[in-house]
Image (tube, rainbow, N blue to C red):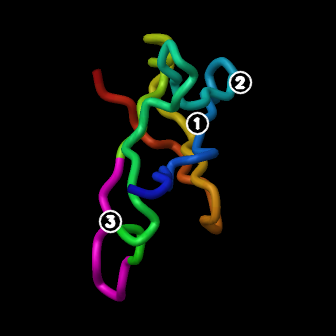
Amino acid sequence: MGCKFTPALGMNFLDPATKKKHTMLKDDQGYLVADMHLPAALKVGPNQIFSTWAKFPAPPDSSKVVTVIIPRTNEPFEDVPISQ
């Protein structure tokens, strides 16, 4: 089968309202709650889209935006609106 990997590894978000960093959730066995892929499936060519997901704790209701940080990208995504 091979080893599976999540491209979301290390991803987190910052809540500017509470100044708190939120990391991915883990299940009761300590595994990340995220889409897992075989390394061969992670090859994305020009003009292709790669879709994946990861689960995070919900920020408090008072938070309206967050900053999303994805490893190996140049800059964070700031002021991402939260919808409930």
Residue occupying the point 54% across, 52% down? 77
**Vertical comparison of 43 with 37: above or below:** below
Residue occupying the point 63% across, 64% down? 72
Q: Are circles 2 and 3 on residues that touch, CB within 8 Å? A: no
Magenta region: which residues?
Answer: 44-52
Instruction: Tell me which numbered mark, 3 or 1, is placed earlier along the sequence.
Output: 1
Q: Residue 27, percent across and down?
A: 48, 19
Q: Nearer the viewer, mark 2 or mark 3?
A: 3
- Identified by mark 1, the residue type is Phe
- Identified by mark 2, the residue type is Lys
Q: Nearer the viewer, mark 1 or mark 2?
A: 1
Q: Residue 47, percent across and down?
A: 29, 84
Q: Secondary structure at mark 3?
A: loop
Prevailing secondary structure of the magenta residues: loop
**Label 1: few (<14), some or many (≥20) within 10 Å?**
many
User: Which numbered circle lies on residue 13?
Assistant: 1
